């Protein structure tokens, strides 16, 4: 049934061996910078590569400030905390996301509220968001409250699924109208733009991830970006144990976190940032090839929409129904081609099944049909 697809993917990667979904690639200054780092002995929480990596990401995304963190989840946790998320809060997000989004909300002791996604972007739907806010919330002293629970809604967290930007300008306008902070989970979307503006720069604050499976990696790592100087300073303070700067004394003025990115990881990040454009070029060529092939096969390949530029982090196809999807997964994996269904919806997981949600028909529809296919850069 999917023999042509299997053959095409094996030909594309020029191998019949096991093919992972995504692999990191190191063809720049990675070893050089890592060696510099080791030679300098600054492998840990202090060093020039952390500052340099932050500057590179700020410059690349167009954000005023960037603060490196130990991983993307930590970046999201602090971003949410900085917009006031606590045990008396709720955070609106999409059910179709990686668990980290909801974990970060939970680390603030807040509850997620789920609104639907759009079928075309796979990201948070402005229509569903507006629908929820207009019927379920009220404004009090310049803030938004959930009528049912009485809790303050501190943030909306859209996620740019697999690097495809959601309708972020519409989401941004709604957030402004309802006095809610927009916190973008841009973990998957470094190199993705909406109307020529980098994802993660639409809201108050955003998070990126540099985990091993992302477009570029620091081994493990993350980044907070924001244009707000106060938030940026507080982000640095909170992620570095809230130590008051002093030549020799150890004074901490709040409960902070050890969420620093080690210099060793940042060294890798600097080298990866230098080759990001080359990686993106390759990923685009791969996606173009997939697009042309799946069009012939009458299989729906997820393509860049108008007004967007996609990093094509993970390529995805949308099968006709769950039966077709299962067949696709079985046949490709049996041949050593790693393919994977999109995440199980967050509202179905034990920890979040009591959480409030709108109807989620698009998320449910996508959950049964979307499959990721190999997307790594092929250096062979
Ligand atoms: C990868 C990812 C994160 C952060 O993950 P870390 O592994 O902590 O860096 C957050 N949200 C989404 C949607 C992700 O894909």
Image: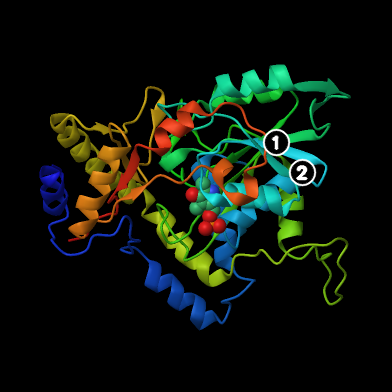
Q: Secondary structure at mark 1?
A: strand
Q: Is residue 356 left or right of residue 161?
A: right
Q: Which residue is located at x 54 percent, y 65 percent?
A: 49
Q: Residue at x 29, y 59 (%)?
A: 20
Q: Quadrant of the N terminus?
A: top left
x and y percentages locating residue 38 in the rendered image? 50, 80
Name the residue beneath numbered marker 2: 85
Q: Which secondary structure lies at badge 2?
A: loop
- Residue nearest the viewer, comparing 117 with 357: 357
Upstream in the sequence, badge 2 or badge 1? 2
Mark 1, Cα crowd under 10 Å, few <14 / some 14-19 / many 20+, is many
**Corner quadrant of residue 346:** top right
Compared to residue 168, the image places residue 99 above or below, namely below
Task: Name the residue that disc number 1 marks.
Answer: 155
328 to the left or right of 131: left
Percent of width and height locating residue 141: 89, 24
Q: Circles 2 and 1: CB distance less than 8 Å? A: yes
Please tell me which residue lies in front, 33 or 251: 251
Q: CA distance from mark 2 to mark 1?
A: 7 Å
What residue sits 23% from the left and 60% below the top? 19
Position of the C terminus, as image quadrant, is bottom left
């Amino acid at each position: 049934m999917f023999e042509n697809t299997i053959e095409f993917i094996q030909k594309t990667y020029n191998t019949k061996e096991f093919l992972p979904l995504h692999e990191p690639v190191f063809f720049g200054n990675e070893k050089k910078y890592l060696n510099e780092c080791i030679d300098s002995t600054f492998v840990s929480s202090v060093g020039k590569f952390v500052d340099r990596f932050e500057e590179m990401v700020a410059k690349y995304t167009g954000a005023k400030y960037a603060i490196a963190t130990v991983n993307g989840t930590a970046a999201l946790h602090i971003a949410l905390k900085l917009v006031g998320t606590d045990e008396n809060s709720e955070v609106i997000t999409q059910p179709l996301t990686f668990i980290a989004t909801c974990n970060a909300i939970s680390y603030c002791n807040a509850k997620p509220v789920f609104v639907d996604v759009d079928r075309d972007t796979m990201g948070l739907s402005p229509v569903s968001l507006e629908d929820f806010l207009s019927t379920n919330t009220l404004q009090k002293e310049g803030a938004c409250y959930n009528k049912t629970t009485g809790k303050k809604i501190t943030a909306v967290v859209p996620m740019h699924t697999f690097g495809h930007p959601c309708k972020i300008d519409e989401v941004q306008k709604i957030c402004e109208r309802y006095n809610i902070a927009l916190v973008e989970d841009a973990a998957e979307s470094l190199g993705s733009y909406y109307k020529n503006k980098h994802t993660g720069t639409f809201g108050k604050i955003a998070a990126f991830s540099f985990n091993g499976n992302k477009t570029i990696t620091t081994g493990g790592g993350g980044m907070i970006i924001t244009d707000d100087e106060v938030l940026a300073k507080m982000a640095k303070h909170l992620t570095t144990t809230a130590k008051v700067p002093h030549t020799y004394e150890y004074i901490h003025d709040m409960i902070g976190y050890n969420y620093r990115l080690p210099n060793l990881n940042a060294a890798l990040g600097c080298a990866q940032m230098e080759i990001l454009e080359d990686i993106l070029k390759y990923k685009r060529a791969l996606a173009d090839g997939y697009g042309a092939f799946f069009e012939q096969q009458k299989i729906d390949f997820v393509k860049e929409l108008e007004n967007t530029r996609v990093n094509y982090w993970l390529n995805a196809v949308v099968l006709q129904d769950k039966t077709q999807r299962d067949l696709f997964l079985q046949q490709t994996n049996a041949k050593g081609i790693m393919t994977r269904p999109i995440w199980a919806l967050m509202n179905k997981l034990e920890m979040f099944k009591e959480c409030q949600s709108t109807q989620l028909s698009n998320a449910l529809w996508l959950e049964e049909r979307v499959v990721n296919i190999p997307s790594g850069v092929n250096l062979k």
